[in-house]
Image (cartoon, rainbow, N blue to C red):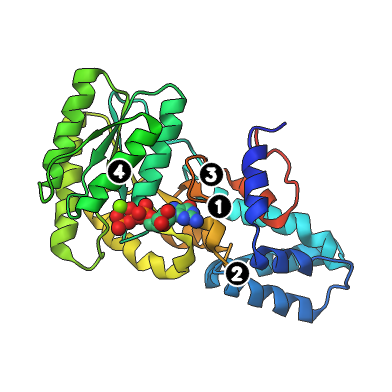
């Protein structure tokens, strides 16, 4: 069993119509101009993005010439390899989050409803199960329901939640959480922030303030600041990334609701456009439905191929 077999199986399980339609293009059929057009169209429809699509197609065409390939099926492994390479180009792609500081801090940011609180809960559960002492920080102080939602996750996973009353200053909650972590010797603080439109500058300033407090409290260490992106939104979600990246130093992406998307190519577009490493993929609403991202395992599951050395 490879290290990421479970991840491959999960991605394969949710493998949607799109990846099947791409996968099915690689068959016994002769390699025709029509094939290239179809492939290009399906990649574009799947949110792979213009640049990545062009570079994939031209690389694959060259390979077909070099190897005198006659049937589309012979290109499938090479195609999967190229997709994986597009992902692997980004430093830190699939790397585990940095939990070396004590306490380490993971801040989740993103627009409304992208899956921040759910991700915070799943992550708290998983890290806690792995033997880490975790604190959840309820820095979304805008809605009472948000604090309750995080507390419910805390109960479910046996993790302490540090919260203040509705309307409190987010940065103060985060400060409290870090103090509590220090006092109790906790390993990691996971910060759930309010969803916000990236165009609201006062809200983005609030996020910057949270980040500053964390930096100050961590000394030489650095937090993970993960942009939580809804896969279903596809490339429409990219506009957010730039604004969030100005407020906090983003260290990666959590790609949520991958189980619901009809456009599996979004991971490739994130690499190409945002140049941010994907760290986790959300594949459902349950506690176990958050998987560390691994590029080769991901592509293996997506296209139903077996890429070599995905777990080396
Ligand atoms: N299917 C599926 N649903 C998810 C996933 N992640 C989150 N959700 C659902 O998406 C909805 C919104 O999730 P939240 O975690 O509340 O999102 P949020 O970013 O905290 O939202 P705000 O705090 O309002 O900005 C909930 O119904 C979640 O159960 C996922 O990976 N797959
Ligand atoms: Mg929330």
CA–CA distance between discs 2 and 3? 22 Å
CA–CA distance between discs 1 and 4? 32 Å
Q: Are marks 2 and 4 in contact (CB under 8 Å)?
A: no
Mark closer to the chain start, 1 or 4: 1
Query: Callout 3: helix, strand or loop?
Result: loop
Disc ID at residue 221: none
Residue 301 versus residue 131 in the image, above or below? below
Nearer the observer: mark 2 or 3; the answer is: 3
User: Which image quadrant is residue 154 in?
Assistant: top left
> Where the C terminus falls, by quadrant?
top right
Residue wearing tag 1: 87
Mark closer to the chain start, 3 or 4: 4
Residue 266 versus residue 210 in the image, above or below? below
Mark closer to the chain start, 1 or 3: 1
Q: Residue at x 63, y 47 (%)?
A: 10
Nearer the observer: mark 3 or 4; the answer is: 4
* Neighbourhood count class around disc 3 (C-alpha, 10 Å): few under 14, some 14–19, many 20 upward: many
Residue wearing tag 3: 293
Disc ID at residue 150: 4
Q: Are marks 2 and 1 in contact (CB under 8 Å)?
A: no
Number of numbered callouts drawn: 4
Disc ID at residue 53: 2
Residue 79 versus residue 108 in the image, above or below? below
């Amino acid at each position: 069993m490879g290290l990421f077999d479970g991840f491959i199986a999960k991605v394969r399980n949710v493998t949607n119509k799109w990846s099947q339609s791409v996968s099915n293009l690689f068959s016994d059929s002769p390699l025709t101009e029509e094939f290239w057009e179809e492939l290009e169209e399906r990649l574009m429809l799947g949110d792979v993005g213009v640049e990545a699509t062009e570079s994939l197609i031209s690389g694959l065409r060259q390979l077909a010439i070099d190897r005198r390939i006659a049937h589309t099926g012979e290109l499938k492994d090479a195609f999967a390899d190229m997709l994986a390479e597009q992902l692997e180009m980004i430093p830190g792609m699939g790397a585990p989050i940095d939990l070396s500081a004590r306490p380490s801090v993971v801040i989740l940011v993103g627009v409304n409803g992208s899956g921040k609180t759910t991700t915070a809960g799943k992550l708290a559960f998983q890290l806690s199960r792995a033997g880490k002492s975790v604190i959840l920080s309820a820095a979304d102080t805008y809605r009472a329901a948000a604090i309750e939602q995080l507390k419910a996750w805390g109960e479910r996973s046996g993790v302490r939640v540090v919260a203040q009353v509705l309307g409190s200053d987010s940065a103060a909650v985060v400060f409290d959480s870090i103090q509590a972590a220090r006092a109790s010797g906790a390993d990691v603080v996971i910060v759930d922030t309010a969803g916000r439109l990236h165009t609201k500058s006062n809200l983005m300033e609030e996020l910057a303030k949270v980040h500053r407090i964390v930096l100050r409290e961590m000394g030489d260490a650095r937090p993970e600041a993960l942009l939580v992106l809804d896969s279903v939104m596809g490339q429409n979600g990219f506009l957010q990334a730039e604004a969030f990246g100005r407020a906090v130093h983003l260290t990666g992406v959590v790609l949520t609701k991958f189980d619901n998307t009809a456009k599996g190519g979004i991971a490739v577009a994130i690499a190409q456009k945002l140049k941010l490493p994907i760290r986790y993929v959300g594949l459902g609403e349950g506690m176990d439905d958050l998987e560390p991202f691994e590029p080769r395992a991901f592509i293996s599951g997506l296209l139903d191929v077996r890429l070599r050395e995905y777990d080396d």
